[in-house]
Amino acid sequence: MFKYKCLNPIAGVGLELFNNKYDKCEDVNDADAILVRSASMHDMELPDTLEAVARAGAGVNNIPLDKCADKGIVVFNTPGANANGVKELVLAGLLLASRDVVGGINWVQSERANEDIAKLTEKEKKNFAGCEIKGKKLGIIGLGAIGVLVANAATHLGMEVYGYDPYISVDAAWNLSRSIKHIQAVEDIYKECDYITIHVPLLDATRKMINKESIAKMKDGVVVLNFARDLLVEETDMVEALKNGKVKRYVSDFPNTTMAGAKNAIVIPHLGASTEESEDNCAMMAVKELMDYMENGNIKNSVNYPACDMGECIHACRIAINHRNVKNMIGQFASVFGEADINIANMMNASKGDFAYSLFDLEKAAPEEVISRIKTIDGVLKVRVIK
Ligand SMILES: NC(=O)c1ccc[n+]([C@@H]2O[C@H](COP(=O)([O-])OP(=O)(O)OC[C@H]3O[C@@H](n4cnc5c(N)ncnc54)[C@H](O)[C@@H]3O)[C@@H](O)[C@H]2O)c1
Ligand SMILES: O=C(O)[C@H](O)COP(=O)(O)O
């Protein structure tokens, strides 16, 4: 029996995929697996019994990835599962930044008791007039699951789209419309574009990438959209740029005390992935990833361990070993099995950065002393008998 703990509400259609081998628990210390959305796990004590964390969503900056990897805890996310939800809200953001719909609606509310509202409207509407996005230049920084969808949709709205992503995946490149201009230096996005939208993960390398210096390189009256993470932007610099008009509008999906009341900021309460469809997609993908890991030891879409998939075990026994990516680990595991007179029927090893993962299918069951010996090998972080 496996126990899972939800740190955030997770869509029922996902949780219903758990079969009768799984039980929900309330205490994280009882959990074999955790499901999470944006709850911060950085200050959490992670129990030694925890095997996996599944982020029902894309961003994993709320999870201590290295600390988890060090404890042999595999962290999954759900790439692309909420991308369409975000894309649609980015399109709304482009329009909200161009037409003062929010100001107009607020004005209508303030005049709702006025009997002359219809007549007054025709006089006052000039205060909320805007511009069209057709023909404008849109720069996209980060062409992953979301960036590609935004790029393609924006071309259909008549925008001239510039895309920048030095690490673009082959899949993303295949999906990108041919009309998107491939930009090699992010400065060209800053220099050329009327609208700039960021779709990169929050990493040390991307933190505060939009700041006084980058804003100074942008066109006067540029619109900046941030549906990725607030910490990608030095927001005190952005507040200043909004005040002096360098940036016309900043659309952000991340309210905080700096930006919530800032002039010319349009701040949305982190609604990018808050659609029925995205929540369902993320929950289902996260649960499937967890079940395949718990039941078969297979890893798909992990952000701190390598992909590794041997399907279902058809042999007597399967052992999963999370370990450091150092030399001679496989040799040591094989010696332990050999000395116990156990033949390896199938095996797979893969690495990601400092961490590695090995699956061994054995022709006979490994006794407890074999498992104990493997656990004592220097560099081994976790050992599980899957079958
Ligand atoms: N507002 C929301 O509700 C919401 C929802 C989903 C994701 N997000 C955020 O959006 C981010 C992107 O999501 P995604 O699903 O498109 O992720 P993704 O991993 O598919 O794409 C990220 C892309 O950024 C690129 N990249 C990395 N560093 C870069 C850099 N320095 N310059 C340019 N490109 C760079 C990568 O190569 C990748 O193609 C997530 O990490 C998350 O923080 C927010
Ligand atoms: O990174 C993500 O997937 C988004 O920011 C969505 O976060 P949420 O699941 O808390 O809505």
Image: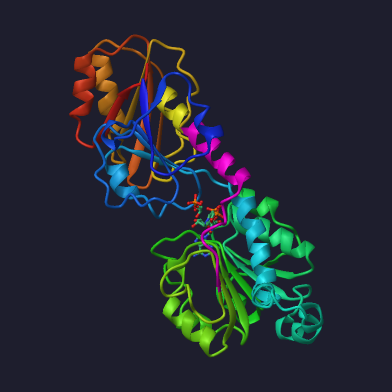
x and y, in percent, of residue 354 in the image:
32, 46
Membership of 279 in magenta stretch = yes
Whether 151 is drawn above or below 279: the answer is below
Picture quarter with the N terminus: top left
Whether 88 is drawn above or below 109: the answer is above
Residue at horizontal 48 percent and vertical 29 percent from the top: 309
The answer, for residue 298, to whether it is visible in the render is: no
* Image colouring: rainbow
Picture quarter with the C terminus: top left
* Span of residues in magenta: 266-289
Residue at horizontal 74 percent and vertical 73 percent from the top: 133
Residues 57 and 125: in front is: 125
Residues 84 and 112: in front is: 112
x and y, in percent, of residue 241 in the image:
51, 85
Q: Which quadrant of the structure image shows residue 199?
A: bottom right
x and y, in percent, of residue 231 in the image:
42, 67
x and y, in percent, of residue 97 in the image:
65, 74
Q: Which quadrant of the structure image shows residue 317?
A: top left
For residue 139, side relative to residue 291 (left or right): right
Whether 8 is drawn above or below 52: the answer is below
The answer, for residue 225, to whether it is visible in the render is: yes
Membership of 172 in magenta stretch = no
For residue 80, side relative to residue 354 (left or right): right
For residue 117, side relative to residue 369 (left or right): right
Residue at horizontal 80 percent and vertical 78 percent from the top: 118
